[in-house]
Every structure is written in C-alpha cells, then in structure tokens.
Amino acid sequence: MNRLYACGSTNESEPLVCQECYPGSRTDDQEAFILDRRSFIRVSAPFVGSILGAQALSGCRRALGLIPSRTPTNLPSELASNTPPPFPTSTNFPAPTPTTASDHAAVVLVKTEDRHAGMQKALSILEAHDFQGKRMLVKPNLNSSHAAPGSTHNDVLATMVEWLDQNGAGQITVGDRSGMENTRRVMDKKGLPAMADELGFDLIAFDELAADEWIHMGFEGSHWPSGFALARPVHDAEGIVSLCCLKTHRFGGHFTLSLKNSVGMVAYQVPGEGVEYMTQLHNSAAQRYMIAEINRAYTPDLIVLDAVDAFLDGGPESGTLAHPGLILAGTDRVAIDAVGVALLRYFGTTPEVQQGLIFHQAQIEQAVALGLGVDDPHKIDLITDDPESSRFVEALRPILLQG
C-alpha cells in the first residue's frame, strides 16, 4: 500500500505525519497514519480544492471584520452537514488598529545562557508592568513534551509566572492544547502539575474543555471554511502572555514563533461537533494565512521568545540544533516573528524561511494585512543595554532590514 500522510507528505524516509491533524490516531511510538482508499478520498478532496484556489490567495488581503459564523454554501453536502452549531460569537474583541507611519514596535534582545536571568533583564528593559490585578492567561508552547526548543523550557514558564506574580497580577492560568501528544500527558511529563502547586497557578488542558467552553469565531473573508473554535479561557482572560520558541515547522507552517503559538488556542474538535479544525488547517494550501487569522481573535500583552536554543530545520519537536543564546521580549507579534525569521536566516535555515522578503512570509504578510502589527522592518526598534547584545543586534539588523 502506498502511503499518503495526512499532512500531504509522501516522503517515507522519515516517519512524519502531522500529528496535529489526527490526534486520535496517535500512539506513543508516533506511528505514521496510513490512509486507505476511502480515507484518501475524504482527506484529499478538500486539500486538492484548496490547492486549485491557491493562486487566488493574493487577493484575500483585506482586513477581516468579526462577524457571526455562517455555514459555508460551497462545501460538499457531507462536509456542510458537519458545520458547527451556532456557538456564541465573541463581540468584545477590539478591532485591530491599522499600523500608521508613526507606529514602532520595540523588541528587546538579550544575549544570555541563563533563561531566568535573561528574561528578568529583558522584561526590565521592556518596562512591561501593567498587570495589576488582572486575570492572566499564559500560553506556552506545549505541542509536545520534547526538550526546548521542542517545547517551552520549564525555567521560562516558571520565571514568567513568578514575574507576573511579583508585578501584581491576579489569578494566573497556564493553558494549551498539544498537537503531537495528549496535552495532559505532556503537562505531566514536564512536571507542570507540581510547578502549578508550588507557584499557585491554574493549569488547563484545552482539549479537556466541554463544548460550552469553546467560542466559535467567524471572520468575513477568512480562509477557515467553518471558522474556528477558540478556548474560552483565552477569551475570558484580562491579559495574555505568549511564550514561544525559535524553530522551523516541517508540516506547512515553515516557522513556528509567536503567531503560530496561537494554534494551541484552537480546538482540534469541539465535543459533539463534527468539524475537525486541525484537519482543515493542515490540509489547506492557505495554512499560513489561517495561522495569522487565529491571531485576529486576541491581542497579547506580552511575548517572550526563547532563542537560547533553536531548530534551524525540521521542527516542531526535533531538528538541527543551534545555540543563539538569546531571549527576546516585546508586545508586537509581527515584530517578534520578523526578528525570529531574521535570526533563523542568520544561522542558516530552510529554503522556505531563508528566501524572499521577511515581510512576504505568508504568516507575517497576512498578519500585517489584518492590522496585527508593524508593516515595515524599519519600524522595529531592537533594544538592548549591554555590549555583547549590542554587537549581535548590529550583526542581525541588516538581515532584518532587508525586509
């Protein structure tokens, strides 16, 4: 039997299936999912259709307004029958403010071998302190239990929670939905329940949420055929912190930084609902635009990118390891991701990430079109306060400014 992987790969030289596509088929051995003829037709039909529409993607850049989701009218009947029930649609997300010529985004860069010390310094330079009394949601990268940069380093998570507590935050919740393993198992393997008990935060596996704990989001012009379901704890938080890693992504995202960290806020499948959101995402030629569109649903108050270690290829759980020895902090997802791509290029990365203008990378380009961040690399201010970090900034800046 010929193998066709759900993520579209036909490369049998490596045991690759996008485990985010079919979590129900996962085993601890990470066996590849093999499709029989009937499954091939079911999976490939929407995928082929999305490929045929890929040339039209460049015309889909207009800003997207938040509207109640509607059942698509151009889907086959077997898919249309699985469209979501009428979930309440959020109405209190502020519309993104389009970037103006005067807007700038600060990205703090600290050269360090110590994640705790590097984060403390970066957050001090950034002067991010507006968390008094707020209910905070911390979104780490828990796609799997693999060591950093495969997942968020425990030192990064603990430092962030402690820093929020020291700066007056109210209740702190750490939440995610894993892609390559069961979320609760990932949390247990990483020792997060014990950390939660010690530091006093709530720990939520989003894939354990009941149906009424998901909010269906629909955007006019979105590439999501059925909209997407956002975890209610994200919606209800008064402040959001994103903890991301520096790495490439071989299952279609090309890179996974702050924008793609948002995928873990979306359901694989809401209980009682037929739509498999992650299958739609990973089988779509518009995957990278869809990643950006998730970010339309919320605004982070703080982003920390752990670049002490990085994957220059492969990813998200393994790859060629580099050691940049950096911590980045900021509040603008586009700026953080642009600097992250520049870092990957500095060390040498995949052709998909290395080539072309940084602001023409689909995730970044669509995020800019949605008004989610700066629209030009010259509007990114790289900030640091020590000679070693400054020397690295001067080496990195020309790559970033090539745009």
Image (tube, rainbow, N blue to C red):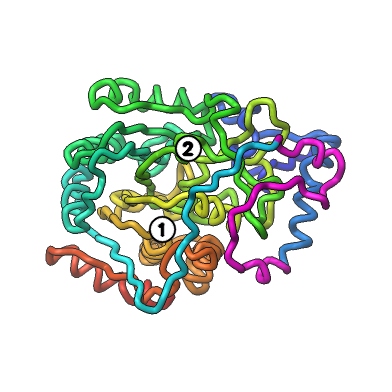
Give the quadrant of the N terminus: top right
Residue 98 drawn in magenta: no
**Residue 29: x percent and y percent?**
56, 26
> In which quadrant of the rendered view does residue 366 lie?
bottom right
Say which residue appears at 51% left-offset and 50% top-offset: 297
**Residue wearing tag 2:** 143
What secondary structure do most residues of the magenta stretch adopt? loop
Does residue 308 appear in the picture of this structure? Answer: yes
Q: Secondary structure at mark 2?
A: loop
- Viewer-proximal residue, 160 or 325? 160
Which range of residues does the magenta coloring cover?
56-85
Give amino acid for label 2: Asn
**Residue 161: x percent and y percent?**
26, 36
At label 1, counting other C-alpha atoms closer than 10 Å, the crowd grade (few under 14, some 14-19, many 20 or more) is many
- Viewer-proximal residue, 276 or 129? 129
Give the quadrant of the C terminus: bottom left
**Residue 389: x percent and y percent?**
19, 63
Say which residue appears at 85% left-offset and 45% top-offset: 76
Give the CA separation, mark 2 to mark 1.
19 Å
> In which quadrant of the rendered view does residue 59 lie?
bottom right
**Residue wearing tag 1:** 333
Residue 64 drawn in magenta: yes
From what the image shows, is residue 182 above or below residue 21? Answer: above
Labelled pair 2, 1 in contact (Cβ < 8 Å): no
Q: Secondary structure at mark 1?
A: helix
Q: Residue furthest front?
A: 91
Q: Earlier in the sequence, mark 2 or mark 1?
A: 2
Does residue 314 appear in the picture of this structure? Answer: no
